Image: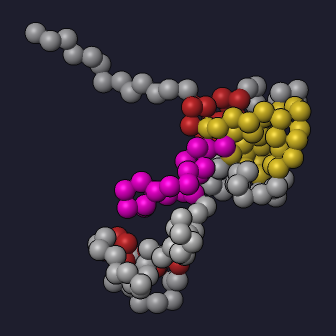
């Protein structure tokens, strides 16, 4: 009889989902301050952040200070800071889409040939064939138009 393992989910290190850059600070207004003992605790604060979508966090080793950030290095100004360590969520650093692009979190808005990208809800220049869920996306962008979703 084969041995069955208990149904447990094994997760890797929480920091595996982040790109680490030593000695960098981000200048941003949208942040939250926390006191944490280490970088993993700061990552947990970022994952649980309820005030905004946390894209990165800064951790200072001397002060054990944690700053969760709504922006990453692609979105704002950075500068050197010897005590700081910047951790950016890798999913927000991607510059390519997977599948039909519904989970894309990058900053590219044009093709490699320079053609502007079409918004998901637009019907021109191409009429996408992705179904009702994509037809409903315009509701998020413009709540004042009639929607087939309501």
Q: Quadrant of residue 135?
A: bottom left
Say left or right for 62 vs 117.
right
User: Residue 20: x and y, percent?
Assistant: 69, 35
- Which residue: 83% across, 27% down? 61
In this view, 145 is above or below 46: below
User: Residue 57: x and y, percent?
Assistant: 72, 42
User: Does the segment drawn in magenta span residue 40?
Assistant: no
Q: Is residue 6 visible?
A: yes
**Which residue ends up furthest to the bottom in the rendered image?**
145
Q: Quadrant of residue 110?
A: bottom right
- Which residue: 51% across, 89% down? 144
Say left or right for 52 vs 99.
right
In this view, 15 is above or below 140: above
- Magenta residue span: 88-106
Q: Quadrant of the C terminus?
A: bottom left
Q: Is residue 48 visible?
A: no
- Which residue: 27% across, 16% down? 5
């Amino acid at each position: 009889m084969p041995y069955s393992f208990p149904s447990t989910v094994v997760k890797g290190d929480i920091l595996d989902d982040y790109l680490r850059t030593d000695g960098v600070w981000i200048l941003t207004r949208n942040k939250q301050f926390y006191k944490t003992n280490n970088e993993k605790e700061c990552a947990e604060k970022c994952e649980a952040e309820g005030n905004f979508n946390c894209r990165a966090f800064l951790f200072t080793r001397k002060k054990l200070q944690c700053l969760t950030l709504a922006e990453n290095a692609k979105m704002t100004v950075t500068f050197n800071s010897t005590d700081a360590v910047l951790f950016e969520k890798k999913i927000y650093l991607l510059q390519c889409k997977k599948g039909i692009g519904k989970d894309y979190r990058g900053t590219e808005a044009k093709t490699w040939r320079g053609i502007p990208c079409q918004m998901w809800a637009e019907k021109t220049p191409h009429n996408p064939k992705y179904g009702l869920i994509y037809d409903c996306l315009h509701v998020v962008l413009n709540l004042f138009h009639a929607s087939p979703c309501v």
